[in-house]
Image: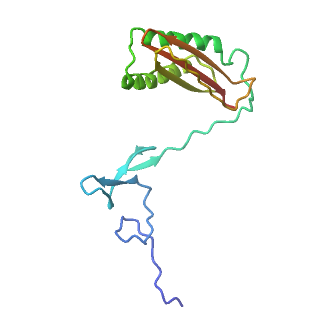
Amino acid sequence: MDSEPKRKASISNSSDSHVPSLAPPHRRMSRVIDPSRKMSMYNMRRPSLAGSQRTGDYVVPKMPVRLANTYRLEPKNGEKFSSGEVSRVIAEVLENYLSGETYEETMCGKLAKNIAEILKERVKSMKFPRYKFVSEVTITQNGRQSMQTASRCLSNQQTDSYATASYKNSSLSAYAAVYGFYFE
């Protein structure tokens, strides 16, 4: 018959790595890096519960949410990205956050990131359904020089749009743009 003995699947955790286990799936594992040795320790692993939920004695992985396709290719009436409303929001945010500020190189870089995130959140709260947003903020020193910016993207003229605004004081000038792309 067979010269090799047949192996049974083990229900308990075994140190034998070639024997499959019938136990429920456990936590995902990730490598632990020892900073003192500056190399990963492949034998040491730590559990990760990302994307799972605990029920009883074992961890059940979360299933991704699946949504039914609506087959809508354009927004309904009144749901389209409004450039005028978004431009007013951009001008208001720039005025609130930049009035009284002076240009400092390191501070303005962080400030531009924060304003871009605030703009994106404010536009999201305006409830344009099925739109994705990109916000861009540029802050430069106001030294009476000219500045020209350009951006290009492939978009649908019927559904996608953008809004811009600028702000200037004696020390700095800022330009912000928010792009709205309809997600089909």
Question: Residue lying farthest left?
Answer: 36
Picture quadrant of residue 178: top right
Picture quadrant of residue 77: top right
Q: Residue at x 42, y 49 (%)?
A: 59
Viewer-side residue, 121 vs 135: 135
Q: Is residue 8 above or below residue 26?
A: below
Is 84 positioned to the left or the right of 26 in the image? Answer: right
Viewer-side residue, 104 vs 161: 104
Quarter containing the C terminus: top right
Q: Residue at x 39, y 46 (%)?
A: 49
| Image spot of residue 23 (x, y percent) | 42, 60
Q: Residue at x 46, y 15 (%)?
A: 143
Q: Is residue 174 above or below residue 7?
A: above
| Image spot of residue 135 (x, y percent) | 55, 24
Picture quadrant of residue 154: top right
Colouring chosen for the image of the structure: rainbow
Q: Residue at x 51, y 9 (%)?
A: 92
Is 70 positioned to the left or the right of 105 in the image? Answer: right
Quarter containing the N terminus: bottom right
| Image spot of residue 4 (x, y percent) | 47, 86
| Image spot of residue 25 (x, y percent) | 44, 55
